[in-house]
């Protein structure tokens, strides 16, 4: 079956960005002028996804409002002839977006499990909002291509420095075919120095529907939460699971420094902002250096 459905977990509390996230979902924090979650939705659409379910939590209503029609705003922009802005605020028309609430914060695995009735008996994608990938071919589409070759679950991975492996789920590969690895086992946030490789799971998954049955009785893992990686490890015991080292630049917007770096990088991508942003960066650096003396 083709991959046409995607889950975007968006129920986290966003504690790293307090106090900004006290009243605003972390997923709605803007990178330049576009909410983080919109980059994720656009990647899914560009990859051929037709149905998205966003798993939300309390206080996340702004996400639903953002992807809804804003009739008064759209009419106002149309009447004023601001057609470029009108095009940018229109709801994505090529995808249906659905919502379900994760009623208690029990981890990523539980968030995915909450969407089980929406998924049914189909393969599906999972895209995490902390990872934005810029590439010629959408990251998720690269994984879908691999799924179509293998008919098996595919996990997006990237090489990370040895000292950062304890922050991620890490794969232990046993066979390699180009950028694709058959996985021997998965390790969730290994202790420093104990990672089986530097290939880290990077927030993009294509999963076969059997994972839902495993999540149904998955016990608590790291942090007292139901970990998706633990269920994938169990799936790998009966069906092959692959890691694919996708092409493109990955930006981590899960913490303040990553968010700032991503915002600068995205601004520099834009022709209408590049020169001004670059000049501002030089000015800030010069002032910071001058203040040291």
Image (cartoon, grey):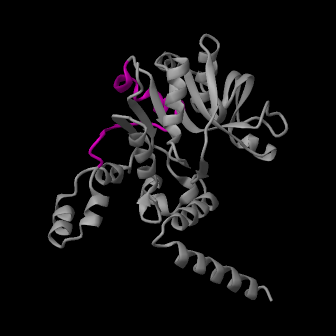
Measured as percent of width and height from the top left, residue 45 is found at 38, 41
Say left or right for 47 vs 61.
Answer: right
Report the quarter where the N terminus lies.
Answer: top left
Left or right: where 73 falls relative to 251: left
Q: Quadrant of residue 218?
A: top right
**Residue drawn at x 47%, y 20% as measured from the top left:** 212
Q: Is residue 14 visible?
A: yes
Number of labels in the image equals 0
Q: Is residue 215 visible?
A: no
Is-magenta flag for residue 119?
Answer: yes
Residue visible at 53% across and 63% down in the picture: 269
Residue 85 percent location from the top left of the image: 29, 66
Question: Is 113 drawn above or below residue 223 in the view shown?
Answer: above
Q: Is residue 55 above or below residue 24?
A: above
Q: Position of residue 70 (x, y in %)?
A: 22, 57
Q: Is residue 240 left or right of residue 45?
A: right
Where does the C terminus fall, quadrant-wise? bottom right
Front in this rendered view, residue 195 or 148: 148
Q: Residue at x 59, y 13 (%)?
A: 239
Out of 204 and 169, give the one closest to the viewer: 204
The residue range painted magenta reads 92-120
Q: Is residue 161 magenta?
A: no
| Above or below for 9 versus 37 | above
Nearest the eye: 38 or 274: 274
Residue 156, image x and y in percent? 60, 35
């Amino acid at each position: 079956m083709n991959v046409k459905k995607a889950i975007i977990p968006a129920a986290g509390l966003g504690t790293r960005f307090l106090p900004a996230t006290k009243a605003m979902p972390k997923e709605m924090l803007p990178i330049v002028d576009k909410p983080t979650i919109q980059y994720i939705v656009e990647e899914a659409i560009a990859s051929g996804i037709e149905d998205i379910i966003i798993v939300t939590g309390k206080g996340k209503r702004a996400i639903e409002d953002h992807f809804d029609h804003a009739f008064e705003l759209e009419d106002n922009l149309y009447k004023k002839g601001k057609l470029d802005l009108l095009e940018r605020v229109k709801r994505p028309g090529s995808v249906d977006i659905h919502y379900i609430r994760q009623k208690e914060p029990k981890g990523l695995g539980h968030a995915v499990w909450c969407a089980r009735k929406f998924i049914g008996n189909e393969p599906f994608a999972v895209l995490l909002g902390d990872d934005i990938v810029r590439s010629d071919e959408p990251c998720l589409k690269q994984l879908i291509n691999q799924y179509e070759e293998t008919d098996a679950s595919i996990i997006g991975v990237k090489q990370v420095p040895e000292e950062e492996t304890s922050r991620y789920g890490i794969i232990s590969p046993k066979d390699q075919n180009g950028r694709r690895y058959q996985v021997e086992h998965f390790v969730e946030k290994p202790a420093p120095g104990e990672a089986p490789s530097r290939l880290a799971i990077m927030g993009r998954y294509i999963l076969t529907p059997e994972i839902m049955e495993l999540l149904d009785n998955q016990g608590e893992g790291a942090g007292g939460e139901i970990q998706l990686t633990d269920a994938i490890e169990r799936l790998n015991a009966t069906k092959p699971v692959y890691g694919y080292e996708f092409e493109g630049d990955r930006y981590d917007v899960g913490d303040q420094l990553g968010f700032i770096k991503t915002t600068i990088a995205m601004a520099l991508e834009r022709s209408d902002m590049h020169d001004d942003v670059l000049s501002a960066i030089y000015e800030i650096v010069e002032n910071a250096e001058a203040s040291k003396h």
